[in-house]
Structures are given as structure tokens and as C-alpha cells.
Image (tube, rainbow, N blue to C red):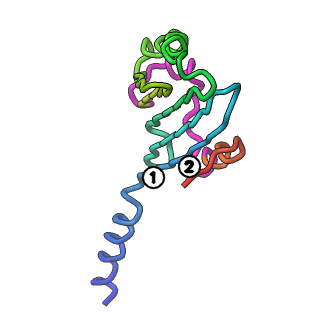
């Protein structure tokens, strides 16, 4: 009986844990100086270490909707420089008074300089630690 049940338990545990892969999905909404900022972070872990994450930062210009193009040009100047780092891709979406900055980071594709610039030299922080840090910063995580 044990010989028949054990493989089933192993397969079930692999299925339920996703072979050691986990996803952390967190968001934060705040208003600063007439701009509503919605931040969404999805972090992917494999075998307890961070592998990749995606930031989506949506800026809604509540008080200055007609300033979106000026605001976007300022934002682009800041964030486009991140594209020079290996493993980092930054893109932008603009819609009327909304500007979304999307930053994709693949830790495995980053070189040492990139990791250092993004403070990812030590990616050994596990899922629980990163989740706790985000929650203490005001994020709501699923």
C-alpha cells in the first residue's frame, strides 16, 4: 500500500507547489501632489530565490490631465536609462491622462553591474522575507 501511495504523494506535492516556483503579487495605491500612483509588482521565485519581477507604475494625472505629454517626457528621461542594464527592459504606455511605466527584470540575465545598480547583489531573500518587506512598506499582497 505504501509503495502505491508514495508516488501519488510525490506527484501531488509537485503539482501543488509548482516544482518550487512561487509568485508574489503586490500592489500599492497612493496620491501625491495631484497624481494618483498605482504600483503593481509581480515577483517570481524558484527554489526560494528571486528570479524575475515586473513593476507596473501607473500615474494618473488627476489635477493636470493636459500635462500628460510633458510629464511623460520627464518620466522617460529618468526610466529609459534603465534599458542600458542587462536583464532590464523598460517600456511606457500613455492614454490621455494616464502614464504607465513597465519595468521587467530578469535576475538571471543581469550581469554584476546591473545587479549592483538595482541592489540585487544578494537575491537570496526568500519569498516570505520579500513579502514581509513589501507589506511593511504599505503594499497589499496576494
- Residue 16: image quadrant is bottom left
Answer whether residue 129 is magenta in the image: yes
Residue drawn 35% across the image and 71% down it: 10
| Residue tagged 2 | 127
Label 2 packing within 10 angstroms: few (<14), some (14-19), many (20+) = some
Q: Secondary structure at mark 1?
A: strand
Could you give the CA–CA distance between mark 1 and mark 2, rounded to whole angstroms?
Answer: 8 Å
Q: Which mark is residue 77?
A: none
Q: From the viewer's perspective, is 42 left or right of 7?
A: right
Q: Are marks 1 and 2 in contact (CB under 8 Å)?
A: yes
Q: Residue at x 46, y 35 (%)?
A: 54
Residue 4 appears left or right of 108: left
Q: Label 1 crowding class (10 Å Cα cut-off): few <14, some 14-19, many 20+?
A: some
- The structure residue drawn at horizontal position 45% and vertical position 30%, both measured from the top left corner, is 107
Q: Which residue is mark 1?
A: 22
Closest to the observer, 132 or 3: 132
| Quadrant position of the C terminus in the picture | bottom right
> In the image, is residue 138 above or below residue 73?
below
Magenta-drawn segment: 107-130
- Quarter-of-image position of residue 125: top right
Mark 1 or mark 2: whose residue is earlier in sequence: 1
Residue 12: percent from the left, percent from the top? 35, 71
Q: Name the residue at the bottom extreme.
A: 1
Residue 74: image location, x then y, percent: 55, 11
Identified at 55% across, 35% down, the residue is 123
The spot of residue 122 in percent (x, y) is 58, 32
Q: Classify 6 as above or below 74.
A: below
Above or below, 64 relative to 124? above
SS for dot 2: helix
Amino acid at each position: 500500500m505504501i509503495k502505491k501511495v508514495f508516488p501519488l504523494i510525490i506527484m501531488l506535492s509537485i503539482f501543488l507547489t509548482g516544482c518550487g516556483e512561487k509568485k508574489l503579487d503586490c500592489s500599492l495605491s497612493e496620491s501625491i501632489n495631484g497624481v494618483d500612483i498605482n504600483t503593481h509588482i509581480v515577483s517570481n521565485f524558484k527554489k526560494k530565490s528571486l528570479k524575475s519581477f515586473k513593476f507596473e507604475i501607473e500615474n494618473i494625472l488627476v489635477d493636470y490631465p493636459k500635462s500628460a505629454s510633458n510629464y511623460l517626457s520627464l518620466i522617460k528621461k529618468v526610466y529609459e536609462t534603465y534599458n542600458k542594464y542587462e536583464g532590464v527592459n523598460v517600456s511606457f504606455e500613455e492614454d490621455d491622462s494616464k502614464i504607465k511605466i513597465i519595468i521587467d527584470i530578469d535576475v538571471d540575465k543581469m550581469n554584476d553591474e546591473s545587479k549592483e545598480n538595482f541592489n540585487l547583489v544578494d537575491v537570496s531573500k526568500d519569498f516570505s522575507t520579500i513579502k514581509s518587506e513589501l507589506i511593511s512598506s504599505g503594499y497589499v499582497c496576494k
